[in-house]
Image (cartoon, grey):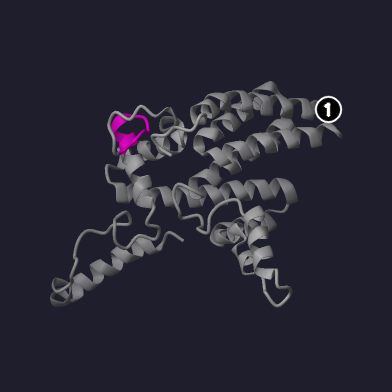
Amino acid sequence: LCLPYPLMALYRSVVAGHFPELSAAWRNDGRFAVVGVIGMENDDEVSYAARAQSAARRGWPGDPFLKDNPSRRLRAMDAVTYSALGLLQRLTGNINLTWVTARWLCAAAWFLLLYAAMLRAAGSPGLALCCAAFVTYFSYLLTFLFLAAWPSSLSPLGPALGKILWSLGSFGRTEGVLRLPRPALTYAALFAAGLLLVRAAERKTWRATALSGVVGGLMLYVRLDVGSTCVFAAAAFALATARRDRAAGLHLGASAALSALLSVPGVQAYLPLDPAVT
């Protein structure tokens, strides 16, 4: 998935070294870039990169275009996500290198976390390896985009039904693991939070429960939809588990309650809607 980036640089250097006359005639012969107005995989990533760069300069993500924007919602919105990207930007000092590095790290995180989840679920290293590699490489399938193309020959309502099914089943966008920050970074955080919930149910210790609850509470500051999904899923997991293991259900319920409590300031920042960003 990420090999094209170093391979493009290698190919460019090889061509420039062996065919200097040809490379000298190249137009738009600037530096390699993945974040820019022209040539991006996803044009909206320009605004996301601006927030990451702003977080690197100021130490906390806010409005990258208005210096003194007082919006509480904007400061809370995806704060953990852009703080992480801002920290990486401070380390690299180059937004293009930050974006490429983040894509490498997120793809690796997806694979490792999915492998750990499937290994716990199936107990087979081979199956876990296959599932983790497939989901990471073909991550765009998670959006169930094929449902939107529901065959109209089945029924006159086919296309409309397909779009309804897609909107219900698709948690994310039509892009895959390389799109930053969502779903690359947000899904990685969601996978980690899910694994910590399972760990809390297995260990039944208050330390594991507290760690799971804190990470679950931070999900709202990773992204609003990820946070709400995590809190409600934790509560549902606790109720389902309590039917067969009351101790595990108690720990999961405490984790869900702690996550919900930590999410309250973020919810308050979103409500009422801030006219500065709506």
In percent of width and height, residue 93 lies at: 27, 42
Secondary element at tag 1: helix
Type of amino acid at the residue the image marks with label 1: Arg
Q: Nearer the viewer, residue 62 or 26?
A: 62
Position of 153 relative to 37 (above/below):
below
Quadrant hosting residue 164: bottom right
Using a 10 Å C-alpha cutoff, classify the residue at mark 1 as few (fewer than 14 neighbours), some (14 to 19) or many (20 or more). some
Does the segment drawn in magenta span residue 60? yes
Does residue 206 lie above or below 219 as drawn? above
**Quadrant position of the C terminus in the picture:** top left
The x, y position of residue 184, in whole percent, is 49, 49
Taking the spot 37% from the left edge, 57% from the top edge, the residue there is: 43
Q: Which residue sits at x=82%, y=31%? A: 242
In this picture, is 156 found above or below 83?
below
Image mark count? 1
Viewer can see residue 232: yes
Asked if one can make out residue 204 in the rendered structure from this viewpoint, the answer is no
The magenta stretch is 54-64
Q: Which residue position is annotated with label 1?
A: 246
Q: Is residue 45 magenta?
A: no
